[in-house]
Image (cartoon, rainbow, N blue to C red):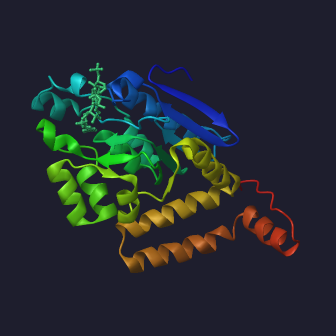
Amino acid sequence: MNFETIQVEVNQGVGIITLNRPKAMNALNVTLTREVGEAVDAFERDDNVGCMIITGGEQVFAAGADIKEMKDQNFVDLYSRDFPYIQRDCWRAIDDARKPIIAAVAGFALGGGCEMAMACDFIIAADSAKFGQPEIGIGTMPGAGGTQRLTKAVGKAKAMELCLTGRMMDAEEAEKAGLVSRIVPAAELAEQAFKTARKIAGHSRPVVMLVKEAVNMAVDADLQDGLKFERRTFEATFAFEDCKEGMAAFAEKRKPEFKHC
Ligand code: DAK
């Protein structure tokens, strides 16, 4: 895969997407939005990939949509052509992905950058990470899930304050609020995210997909529906060879060899 604004690689079952517009703090222009979508879709189809990482590298995750590219847009265009004017943007691809996606965030994750990280399944943050929805400061508002996902993640009070003021929160505040799964030293972010993704990729792929689906049910469904779904999916894992293998390996005191079926 050849891209202009991102770098991609596959290593030991992990598909890694690195945003790569360092001069613009990885601002999400239309090309990058499309390319991340294409890369996620490609990893989703790739049998060698069991888990993905989206990262901006060591300095910055992404400072939001590209304001310079966006500034001359008008409502009729945005509405009638459905900004960012492409069939398949990163948010749609990330939302549709059935394989887990980890956001590895260092530095700023602002606006669309914060929204991209929140669209992923969980966020591992470097101690340098800063999250925010500063759109109000440029006379607009979040448009790719900021008011919705942030509110579900951190609750109304904090989400409302952050969206209305544009204030950023640091990694510690984000972890306390439940936005990030854990914080690691900035120098270890790539390694820790990779280790986590490799661990997930080593598990039975169909079981991983079911677990992702079940946890996501908890976000959107009521408890009784979620519990019923979990019970059915738990039962369904007994149809997989990997389930037999995992339990046999435990009884025989050896490592399981999953075949992802
Ligand atoms: N867009 C374009 N360029 C950006 C940028 C951005 N968002 N953020 C930074 N840059 C560029 C700067 O213009 C500068 O470029 P040069 O001047 O050197 O050419 C370079 O990156 C370094 O930035 P600064 O000089 O400003 O660096 P500082 O360290 O002083 O400040 C900062 C860093 C991140 C605090 C600051 O750059 C900043 O406030 N940036 C803007 C943050 C922001 O307002 N983000 C929200 C944008 S609106 C949707 C999808 C997505 C969205 C909406 C809808 N749909 C699918 C419907 C998303 C909207 C947004 O994200």
User: Where on the picture, by quarter, is residue 62?
Assistant: top left
User: Whole-percent x and y of residue 51?
Assistant: 59, 47
On the picture, is 182 further left or further right than 261? left
Name the residue rendered at 32%, 26% in the picture: 29
On screen, 170 above or below 89? below
Q: How many marks?
A: 0
Q: Residue at the location (27% across, 42% down)?
A: 111
Indicate the quadrant containing the C terminus: top left, top right, bottom left or bottom right.
bottom right
Counting from the top left corner in percent of width and height, residue 173 is at 35, 59
Picture residue at 35% right of the left edge, 75% below the top: 222
Q: Residue at x 14, y 52 (%)?
A: 164
Q: Is residue 123 left or right of residue 166?
A: right
Left or right of 234? Residue 230 is left
Q: Position of residue 112 (x, y in %)?
A: 30, 40
Judging depth in this view, the residue of 192 and 5 nearest the camera is 192
- Give residue 236's quadrant in the image: bottom right
Of 176 and 74, nearer the camera is 176
Image coords of residue 253 (percent x, y): 87, 71
Split into quadrants, the picture shows ligand 1 in the one at: top left
Q: Residue farthest to the bottom?
A: 224
Check the picture and name the quadrant holding the N terminus. top right
Q: Nearer the viewer, residue 177 or 261?
A: 177
Residue lying furthest right in this view?
A: 252
Write down the quadrant of residue 136 in the picture: top left
The relative height of residue 260 versus residue 6 in the rendered view (above or below) is below
